Amino acid sequence: MRTQIDYLADKYCFTERNESPRLRQQWQDVLEECRQTEAGPEERLRIALLNVDYVTSFELPFRLLLTRTPQLIAALREEWGISQKNVVFNDKRFGCVYSLKASLSGVPDTFRYHLSHRIRRVVGNENTSLPYQQVAREVKAPRERLKYALEAGLLVTALDGLFWFGSQRIAA
């Protein structure tokens, strides 16, 4: 049996602390184009790579709501000449910057991101967010949040992991 889960964003703000006005505008343009064209995951990534100076592995799931970012990047890497640079996020996580530009010398080595959101998880006409919010409040470590939620019998999707558990990647 399939259950349709809708995520309704009352507020969603994802920012990088030192983001330039140029980069901020590029992301606004990308998000608007993705909305207008109702782009799917691979097309959203294509639009971002074509229109933003660089994208990071940390921000792609949050900005474009991509749940299979590494696989999408790998597929496009074969098609396009994507440059890559290793960087650090929020002083502790390692990741990559991707760009269609050949040189990434002007790209920072570290990034600090902030996410604030108010999202409702709706199944049918019922708001089912509360148990996920409680797990996020009670358990601090992302992996422990996921483990706790699964042990409590919650149905956890990749977007649940992204929004409430701080997990960018959840394998089947």
Image: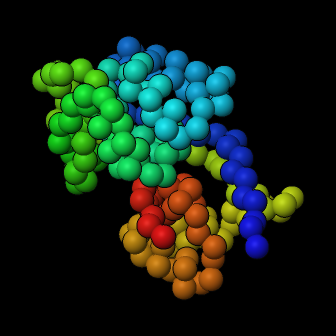
Locate the N terminus by quadrant: bottom right
- Image quadrant where residue 3 sits: bottom right
Image coloring type: rainbow
Image position, residue 150 (x, y; %): 55, 79
Residue sitting nearer the eye, 16 or 33: 33
Depth check, front residue: 15 or 31? 31
Residue 168 in the figure: left or right of residue 152: left
Q: Quadrant of residue 85?
A: top left
Q: Is residue 137 visible?
A: no
**Residue toward you, 90 or 100:** 100
Residue at 53% over, 60% down: 158
Residue at 58 percent across and 38 percent down: it is: 40
Residue 79 x %, y %: 33, 32
Residue plotted at (24% across, 20% down): 101
Residue lying farthest to the left in this orientation: 105
Find the residue positioned furthest to the bottom. 151
Residue 35 place in picture, x, y as percent: 64, 27
Does residue 93 appear in the picture of this structure? yes
x, y percent for residue 2: 74, 67
